[in-house]
Amino acid sequence: MVGSSLSTELIGGVAALLTTLCWLPQALKILRTRETRDLSLLAYLAFAAGVALWLVYGVLIGSIPVIMANAVTLVLLAGILSLKLRYG
């Protein structure tokens, strides 16, 4: 049997936190160095589209961890993409 709802939500929340915060060092490095040449614009655009779809999915199923993780990740990715477009 699957664990309790609280345990499941806790696991989802921790997973969401870790996979969301992993983008923060990249964004901070770009802000510090203003270097984005090695980032693939197409890969980041595709990933952002996927994250946006996960966000919609989270809203449709009413999952707070999925919604929050993907909303924050999308904000961080939008920042990275805007820096990529600005610094090339």
Image (spheres, rainbow, N blue to C red):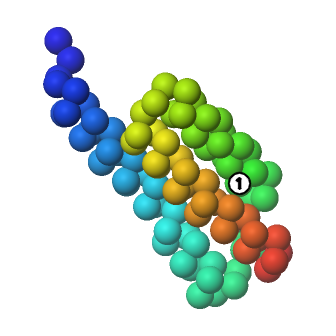
**Which residue is rendered at x = 75% and y = 59% of the image?**
40
In this view, 5 is above or below 47: above
Q: Is residue 77 left or right of residue 87?
A: left
In the picture, residue 2 is in which quadrant? Answer: top left
Q: Which residue is mark 1?
A: 44
In this view, 52 is above or below 8: below
Residue density around tag 1, few if under 14, some if 14–19, many if 20 or more, within 10 Å: some
Instruction: Looking at this view, name the residue that lies furthest to the bottom.
Output: 32
Camera-side residue of 51 and 60: 60
Give x and y (percent) for residue 75: 60, 60
**Which residue is rendered at x = 69% and y = 84% of the image?**
34
In this view, 55 is above or below 84: above
Instruction: Looking at this view, name the residue that lies furthest to the top.
Output: 1
Residue type beneath disc 1: Tyr
Q: Is residue 43 visible?
A: no
Number of numbered discs: 1
Give x and y (percent) for residue 18: 37, 54
Camera-side residue of 45 and 37: 45
Q: Is residue 77 left or right of residue 71?
A: right
In the picture, residue 3 is in which quadrant? Answer: top left
Image quadrant holding the C terminus, namely bottom right
Q: Is residue 63 left or right of residue 2?
A: right
In the picture, residue 33 is in which quadrant? Answer: bottom right
**Which residue is rendered at x = 75% and y = 51% of the image?**
45
Give x and y (percent) for residue 13: 32, 45
* Element at label 1: helix
Give x and y (percent) for residue 48: 68, 49
**Which residue is rendered at x = 73% and y = 64% of the image?**
81
